[in-house]
Structure formats: structure tokens, C-alpha cells
Amino acid sequence: MAKKAGIPSKPYPEFPLFAHSSGQWAKKIKGKLWYFGIWGDPDHAVQKYLAEVHEIQAGRDPRIAGVVRVYSDEITVYDLCNLFLERQQARAKAGEITNRHFSDCLLTCKLVTSHFGKFMRAAKLRAADFKALREKFSPTWGPVKVSNELQRVRTFFKWAFESELIESIPNFGPDFKKPSRAVVRRDKQQRQSSRGGKLDFTADEIRKLLNNSSDWMHACILLGINGGLNNSDCGRLSSNFLELDSGWYDLARHKTGIPRRFPLWKETVEAVRIAMKQRPDAKKDTDDSLCFLTSHGKPLRWEIVKESGEVFVCDNITKAFTKLCRACGVLKTGRGFYGLRRSFETVAGGTKDQVAVDLVMGHADESMSAVYRQSIDDERLIDVCDYVQGWLFEQKSEAR
């Protein structure tokens, strides 16, 4: 078969590599294509091949193992993405990051390789290249989404530099920066204005939702306003960590590992007990300890990790809550179940005990005071939750 125009022949018959259309000498080893150097320097390419081939045949990636020097002037963006994702996947399996975070990293790497191409040398990237990447972001993205995407790209190249895969962090240029706080604030105000108000609920709206709900949804609403639990918290709520007899919730937040503790209202305890009695048998033994299950015996919220690594979330709480809000006439664009958590934080602030509110919410306290503070008296937590309970239920009697 005739060679394509411009692709060189082997320098000599025994030369172990072939000329790849990317401009590099390559060889397929153990079912994977490996690159060893540019066409213009076949001697350097074969030396690199001989230095690395035994490690590759042994099933080790010499770029990761550090057995041989990484040729940072030749490594491509595609190679960096694969190495970065391998590391992030290992972290996800170890529980260091969530599957959702890995999925976000995967989508960012797909965007980067789609824009720059598989064979773009990482060392060749300049400020103009990152400006062009920024311009490829969807115009529908808000400043927060843009900021998150920019940060992941920067983190990706910082990781490559610290892993000694590239000799320096690229110059991202002046146009590859996060939107300013002023831009974020203006966008927030515009979105709030377009949807007709803030994202918390009034006491009257919450009572209307409670009066028209039952089973696990009724319990979830109470947990949301009693202690600021969100969709994930309710979905994974286990009877192993819920002290219904003593009336306390005491469990670190799954998302951050930050301690969280608050007293349960009698209304909340009763609703959880009723929901647990009506709960069907779990389809899987691993879900048997969950307080709430769907009518099919599945968790209220669960994730599917696709073969590609992307995460699909099935959130029955969001679906049912949206349907309930529509039926009660309190549906508002952008306001979902998380609005109950916002409502608790907003109302509880009236106690002027933010330290206790933060413990109920599971918020991090990075202040020096938190370093020295050894504990918070339960009475302060009771006062915070009683204050919100009074706001929710006493307003009803006042309205009468």
C-alpha cells in the first residue's frame, strides 16, 4: 500500500516504529498506541522507545511510574487528560472525591480535548489558545458555571505541572479568569428578578405543603425546615444514625464530613415514624437501613455511573416536590426542595447565634474561634430549632 503524501518511510527496515499521521513515531503495544517522538528526530524516538518499552509491556505507564523521564515538550493535551482522569478515578474509588465530581472533571477534559484536539502539544499552548477555549463555553452558562469550568481547567494543568508531566503551568492570559464578584452579584439579582423573588419559602407556603403531603414527602419537608436537610441528606437518611427515641439527628454531612447535630421536633419524629412504617421492602439489602424508599423499594435519590464515567442522578424527591408545589400553587422557577434549607438558614439567623446555626446546617467554620471551641451546648441548638418551629407553627395561630 502506498504511503500517504508527506508521511516518511522508516529510516531503515529494522526501525521498530511507524510514522503516525500526528507527526510522531508510534507503536501499538498491548493494544494501545504509544508515541515516542517527532518524525524529524527518529534516533531520539527509538531511544525513548527502548527506554520505555519494557515498562509498557509489564503493564505500567512509564509516565506515571516515573521510571523514565517524561518528555514534557511532546506530551499532548489528550495524554494529560487521560492521566488526570486515571488519578481522579482512583480518588473517587477511594472516597476522596464524589462520583459527581469525577463526572464534572470528565466533561471538562472532553471539552478541552474537543477544542484543542488529541495531538495538541501541551507545551505549545498560549494565552490566545485559552482565550479561544473560553469563547467556546456555552452562552447559556451563568458566571458560577463559567467560574467552575475555568477552575477545573486551571486545576488540571496545575496537577500536570506538580506531577512533573509539564515543565511549567501555561500562561492562561488575561481573558481566562473567573467573572468578578460584581458580575456574579448582578447575575444573581437578574435571575432573582426574572423568577419573581427569593428562593426561600414563607411559613404559610410550607404549611400548605405539609397539609397537602403525606408519607415520606411529609417527613422530608419537616426534616428540611427542622434542620436544613437537603435532597441528598433525606435520600440517604438511615435509621442507624437517627435517634428517634431521644429526638436528635447527629451525623456529619456526607458532602463535607463536617459535624452536624440538631433536635428533632415532635412533628418530625412522628412523620418519620409513620413513613418508616409505610415503607416497602428494600429491593437491595444494602438499602434496608434507609428510612425512606419509593413504592418500588428503591432509594429516593440514587446515582448511576455510566461506563464513560458520567453520572446520572435519579432524584425522586425533586420530582415529587415539584409536583407538590405545582398542586399547592407555590411553584416558582429555580426554587426547589433546597429552598427549605435556605428558609431554615434565613429564619434561624434571627436567633443571632450563628455558631449554633452553622452546626445545625453542617457549615464549616474556618475562624480561629472554631479552633479553640471544643463544643456547643445542646441548649443553644434547641433554642435555634425551637425558634424556627415557632416561626412556622405559631404564625398559623396568629393568623387565626
Image: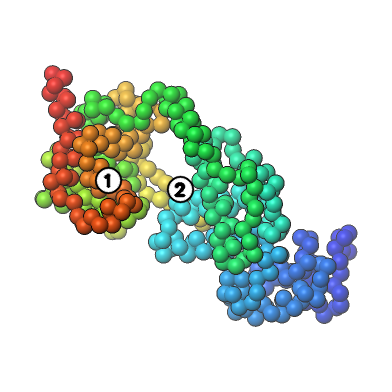
Query: Is the N terminus in the top left, top right, bottom left or bottom right quadrant?
Result: bottom right
- Marks 1,2: beta carbons within 8 A: no
In the rendered image, residue 33, in percent from the top left (x then y), is placed at 68, 67
In the rendered image, residue 30, in percent from the top left (x then y), is placed at 64, 73
Residue at horizontal 60 percent and vertical 67 percent from the top:
164
Of marks 1 and 2, the one in the foreground: 1
Number of marks present in the image shown: 2
User: Mark 1 = which residue?
Assistant: 358
Q: Earlier in the sequence, mark 1 or mark 2?
A: 2
Q: Which mark is residue 312?
A: 2
Residue nearer the viewer, 45 or 234: 45
Task: Name above or below for residue 254 compared with residue 183.
Answer: below
In the rendered image, residue 175, in percent from the top left (x then y), is placed at 63, 42
Query: Is the C terminus in the top left, top right, bottom left or bottom right quadrant?
Result: top left
Query: At numbered mark 2, what does the secondary structure look like: helix, strand or loop?
Result: strand
In the rendered image, residue 352, in percent from the top left (x then y), is placed at 22, 38
